[in-house]
Image (cartoon, rainbow, N blue to C red):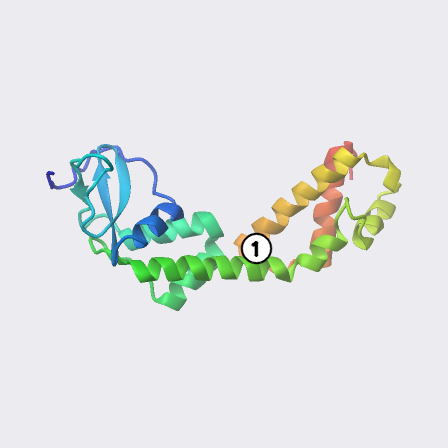
Amino acid sequence: MSIAPLPPTIPLSGVPGVDAFQSAAAQGPQVVVAVDGRDLRVLAQGSMDGGSAQRSVAWVQSDLDVAGMFMQALSQAYGGGISAAVARELGLEPAPGRPLESRLVLQAVDMAQTGQRALAGVDFLTQLEHSAAAQGSAFRTVLADMGLAPSALSSTQRQQIDAAMTDRFLSATQAGEVPVTPETAASWLKDTISRLTNRAD
């Protein structure tokens, strides 16, 4: 095993995902990030085992921030609004060159998951009312406003509409833009139906 300064020109892969931080946090009291070849690896403090054999890695130097990398991974997984709220609640701040407490990693992920479920639940009824497959009341209203009969849409189109709407609601949740107003959901629905049926507004 060799420990060396991080070369400034080393081409690194992207920031590891939340799963990598969680896995390392379950193995030790602190989490660090190490450079292994061209990859960033998340490890429990002091764990340098690369599997079946020891591997040469270099500890992250002071110009890299483990806490910052973790919050970036959390933001990618759960959205900026949720990750920012978690960071405030736990007091997570940039700390270049310092390991991250495993308990904070696990607590942050748990809070983010709880927050995402809670925010998604806020819009459950709105999403159901705008469901094409369920023929919700708002869905029928939007169709009527567009001069379309429910029979004008195939079951495949209905599934595509609901999938597109789910993506829109999820994006709103991750951005912390909830609850979604019925007017906004109706606008999304009209736009989605227009695109699928090639209708101009």
Q: Is residue 35 left or right of residue 194?
A: left
Residue at 31% in and 54% down: 25
Q: Is residue 33 left or right of residue 74?
A: left
Q: Quadrant of the C terminus?
A: top right
Give the class, few, some or many, for how many residues have Cα within 10 Å of label 1's Cα (few <14, many ≥20).
many
Labels in figure, total: 1
Task: Between residue 72 and residue 53, name the one nearer to us.
Answer: 53
Identify whether 94 is placed above or below 139.
Answer: below
User: What element does badge 1 sit on?
Assistant: helix
Task: Between residue 54 and residue 108, name the one nearer to us.
Answer: 54
Residue behind mark 1: 173
Task: Between residue 156 and residue 29, name the one nearer to us.
Answer: 29
Please indicate, yes or no, whether residue 93 appears anywhere in the rendered image: no
Q: Is residue 78 left or right of residue 143?
A: left
Residue 164 spot, x, y in % from top left = 66, 41
Residue 139 spot, x, y in % from top left = 80, 49
Residue at 49% in and 57% down: 113
Q: Residue furthest front?
A: 52
Amino acid under label 1? Thr
Residue 50, quarter of picture: top left
